[in-house]
Each structure stands twice: as structure tokens, then as C-alpha cells.
Image (cartoon, rainbow, N blue to C red):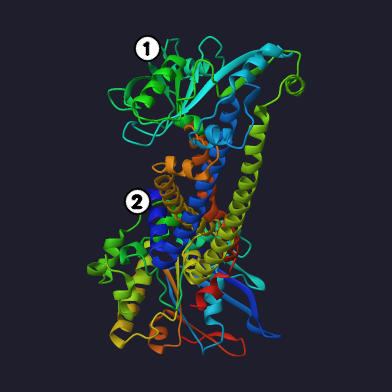
Amino acid sequence: MKKRGIFKLIRSQLSGNTVRFAGLVTVVGVLCFVLFTGTVIITSLNNGLSTLGERMGADIMLVPLGEEVNTEGILIKGEPGYFYFDPELVDDFYAADIEGIDKIERQFFLQSAKQGCCDMSVQFIGINEDDDFTVMPWIRESMNRDGDYLSDLGIVVGSDIDVPEDHQLKFYGHHYNVTGQLEETGTGLDYTVFTNMDTIVDLKQGAIEQGFSFLNEVDPKTNISSILIKVKDGYTIDEVVHNIRASVDGFQIIEAKNITGSVEGSIKGFVILLYILLVAIIILSYIILAITFKLSVYEKASQYALMRGVGASKKQIIRLILNEAAVISGIGTVCGIAFAAIVLFPFKTAISGAVSMPFLFPNALQTVVILAGVAILGISSGPLSAIISAGKISKAPIYQSQRSL
Amino acid sequence: MSDTILDIKNISKSYRNKRREVAVLKDLNLAVTQGLFYGIKGDSGNGKSTLLSIIGGLQKPDEGAVIYNGKDITGLDDNSLAVLRRHDIVYISQFQDVIPELTVAENVRIVDYFDGDVTGSGKESAEDILSGLGLFDLKDELPETLSGGELRRLTIARAIYAAPKVLLLDEPTNDLDSTNKQLVIDILKKLTARGITVIVATHDDNVADSADVIYSLNSDFSFNICG
């Protein structure tokens, strides 16, 4: 009963000036919207970066030397592409038997067409199951069980590829059975289809049947697009890179740490900018809230004096003002977070595509933590902004304040 | 001596007005007997309102003491004074002040919000009080719809609901027509008949003349019984 009475009193105070009430709710709402959106974006970028490092799975990647090779586009932005080594170069690489290499994996890149022969334009990565040490472990981890996912023209697709109910996707006029879908990475790999080399051969056949000539000169048995290298224990990546450079030519050597490092560099600048924006908005919001609460409290000084006159203590007046501020900021917080969620979650694919950086939305636990953090900051913003004014007005002389009506 | 509910001893109070101190009360003494109706007359600025505000615990005197039921209330802390203002010595200012966003009945019950006793156990119900003051039909209205006389009765209803021992009223008939003035006087007389001590500061002779004891507060700080 006591609480109901206080809420009634708070409600009466809030209803006194609906424009100010709406203004204060809006300020807190904007604060929470920006905080929630900003924190989700920062977390998504960090998640994407972290997943990119994990999903590379190799220490070194070798691709053909040349401007047309857009590894970053394939791995990070999900821009389909293809390029192939001269088979002689690959033979030279194997023949060199370079010191410090533990495992070597070959991958074949292929791009589907945008025309009607294909359900969608995606990146294919064909693997050799006998040397693969990056893709199959990831597929098994994602599926949470062992299985022969890529045999019999089976394909495993990234998380952002829409899989029909019949699990059939058409590429170059041929239908392929989707045997699994990988967990989200926030990178270009989410738009990738993983196959074995038999499927690549079938895709090539389909492409030729459909009149595409770009694979005419390519033999999936001898041409490969990239070589992934796992460094042997006891060797550093730099040592192995040095050994490769000393042994063979014609390879663009990409260290996994450099891919994540360059992405990290771009993300860092963006994240710093976001942090500055967030801090500026927090400070600005608190200033606006403090000024508005001060005006509001002083405007009602005579009412607080009346309450003091009929028996409210200083503490009760402070509590009343802070509760009123908490109700305002609570409503603003709910509105701000709800609006942010409406903007963020339904459009997450579009947002992640627009940022052109590894971008993996927060998982459930991270979302709860962000939600709790923003809610605490949002709800406390009102009482924190009003506390000084509440303290001052509670100490105002009752008799003089009543006479100033 | 056992009937003395309030003993005001050597009260002095001055205000700072620009660069000089203006004395309002000087060495004032008053013994108040329980259940009587006191009228304090005097010209504007002679300190009637200040005296009531000091007795009501709204402000402290510069010197002197207010003894209520044998206890000096001028030294009480904020919480104790707040409790005293709720139920013991209730003050009604001359400004017909109410919370505009609360209904008439809610304004009457406002003390409950600070008591934590919304059920109002042991008190006369707000509805009964409003009935007694002719305001029952307006109980769900907002104060903005009330006339001056109704607002004055509302502030008295609020005070009655708090079940005070001492009721202090500052110019209770200000801006009221003769009918409403008489209505207020009749209410105050009924309250004293119920054992409530009523002290009214007024420059209205009709009100003062209705009191059991009339004091005059003069510009030379003298304070005498005049009726």
C-alpha cells in the first residue's frame, strides 16, 4: 500500500508537465538507443575479428601473386572471386619441401553466376579431404558430430545462405544437397559454400554446359587457388615465411595475423570513434538531464515545500524526486532499448553487409550483459542527474518556499 | 499547568532584508491551553505568520524555545520535526496550497504518503471529513475546479485528516466571502469542541472575535491579551 501511494504521488508529479516528461523520456531514450546500438556494433566488430582469427585455421596462406587476387574480399567482405596458381608453381612448392611446415592444405575457389542457372551468387571453396585441416574440423564442430558431409555432391553452406526446405540449391543448372549449415562467423565465410573437389568438377561441368567459358582452361585436379600452411612446432611463422621466400617465387604470402591485424587496424579507428561518440552523448545527456531536472524541481519548489509542511522529511522529498527521475529514465530506457532492438536485430544482415568488416552479432549472453549494462546506465541516469537538485530543494526553507508561491 | 499544550518561551526572530537585519519577533512568550481557540491579531508584517511557522516547526527561532507537551521542539532533527508536523502540530498556510495533480480526496490523504499508512487506520475517513465540510461531491475532482472557499475547506479537511493536537491557521478567511468566512469559523469552533487546540493568525475581526482567547501582536513587538 505504501508503495502504491508513493507511485500515485510520483504519477501526479509526472502528469504535471507532459511536455517536459516526454522531453526527459526522449533524452534518456536517445541515450540508451545510442549506448545499446554502439555497444552492439563494437561487440559485433570484436566478435567478427575474433572469429576471423579462429576460422582462418592456418598460420600462413599462399595465393597467386597479382593484383586480381582479392583474398580480403573473399574472407572478410564476402565478395565472391576466383584465381588459380600456375600448376608448375605448386609443383615447385611441393618439391621444395620447405623446412618448418607441418601441414599443407589446398583449396579451390569458384564463383557462382548471378544468372538464372544459379540460385544465388556465392563463393565456393573446394577442399581436398585428404589434406584439409581447416574446413572439416570446423564443419564437424559446427554440426557437433562426425559425418561425411561433402561426399555425393553434398555441400555445406555458410550461415547467411538461405537454404530451401528441400535442402536443394541449384548452381550452374545442377542441384546440390545441402548437408549442413555452419555457425555464423560475421565474415565473408558466411556467404561461402564448401565442397569437395568432386563437386567442384561437377560445378565446372555445369558451368561449361551453361556456356560459361571462364573455367575452360582450369583443371580442378591440378589448378588450386590457395595453399594453407600450419607451422611445425618449434618454428615461428616468420621463420617459415622466410624459408618460403628463400625457396620459391610467385607466391603472395599472407600471414593470418596480418589479415586480422589489418582488419584490427581498420576496426580500431572505427571503434575509437564510436567510443568518443558514446562518451560525448553520455556527457551531453547527463548535462541536459541535470539542467532539465533542476528546472523541473525548482518549478515545483512550492509543492515540495507544501509536502514538507504537511510532514514530509528531507529524505522523503529526495526519495520522491529520485523515484520520479527513475521512473522517467526507466521509461526512456525501455523505449530506447526497444527502438534500438527494432532497428538492429531485424536488419542485422544488412548492417553487417554495410560495414564491410568482420561483424558478428553478440550471442545471447553478450546481449544480456549489454542489455543489463545499458539498462543500469539508463535507469540510473535520471536519479544521478537529479540528485544535486533534489538535495538542494529538500534543504530549502519550508516557510519561505511556501510564501514564494 | 497540566492543560498547557504549548509553551512559547522568549522567542525572537529576525530576517535579513538586503543589507540589514529586520526583527520580527522579540522575546515573545505565550502559554497555550489545550482545546482552546486562540486568535492572534495584528497588522501585516507584525510577525503573526512567522510566529505560527515557528510553532509549527516550519522554521526555527533565532532565540527561545517552543515547548510542546513538555518537550522543546526547536532542537528536534528533521525526521522528528516531520513526524511532528504530520500529526501533532499541523500548519495551514494562507495560500490555499494543494497538489494540483491530486484529486480532492487524494489531497486530503496526502499525509498517508509520508506516513506509509495509506489505510489510514484510526483516523476519520477522508470521505467523512469531506462530507462534514460539504466537499464530498467534489472528492474526485481536481483542485482547479474548486472555488476559493472550497479550497480553504479542502486545506482544513487535509489538516483534520491528520488528526492533529494543535491546528495552526494563517489568515484562514483571506479572500473569502462572508458566507464562507462564517463556514470556516464554524468549522474551527467544532474542532475546538473536539479538543483540538486552534491558533489562528488573522487581521479579520470576525475570526478573532470568535476565538476563546485573543492576542494582539504589535509593531513594537509587544504581545498582549486583548480579549
Tally the numbered discs. Answer: 2
Q: Residue at x 37, y 52 (%)?
A: B118
Q: Nearer the viewer, residue A371 or B221?
A: A371
Q: Position of residue B98 (x, y in %)?
A: 40, 70
Badge 2 is on which residue?
Answer: B119
Q: Residue at x 27, y 23 (%)?
A: A166
Q: Quadrant of residue A19?
A: bottom left
Which subunit holds the residue at mark 1? Answer: A
Q: Nearer the viewer, residue A255 or A275?
A: A255
Badge 1 is on which residue?
Answer: A152
Measure how far apart labels 2 and 1 are at the Cα level: 78 Å
- State left or right for residue B108 relative to residue A50: left
**Tag 1: residue type?**
Asp
Q: Position of residue B13 (x, y in %)?
A: 64, 78
Q: Position of residue A80 (x, y in %)?
A: 48, 34
Classify 10 Å Cα crowding around label 2: few (below 14), some (14-19), many (20 and above).
few
Which subunit holds the residue at mark 2? Answer: B
Q: Is residue A164 above or below residue B193?
A: above
Q: Is residue B220 above or below residue A208?
A: below
Q: Nearer the viewer, residue A195 or A403?
A: A195
Classify 10 Å Cα crowding around label 1: few (below 14), some (14-19), many (20 and above).
few
Q: Is residue A149 above or below residue B82?
A: above
Q: Secondary structure at mark 1?
A: loop
Q: Secondary structure at mark 2?
A: loop
**Tag 2: residue type?**
Thr
- State left or right for residue B186 relative to residue A64: left
Residue A299: in sight, yes or no?
yes
Q: Is residue B117 above or below residue B185?
A: above
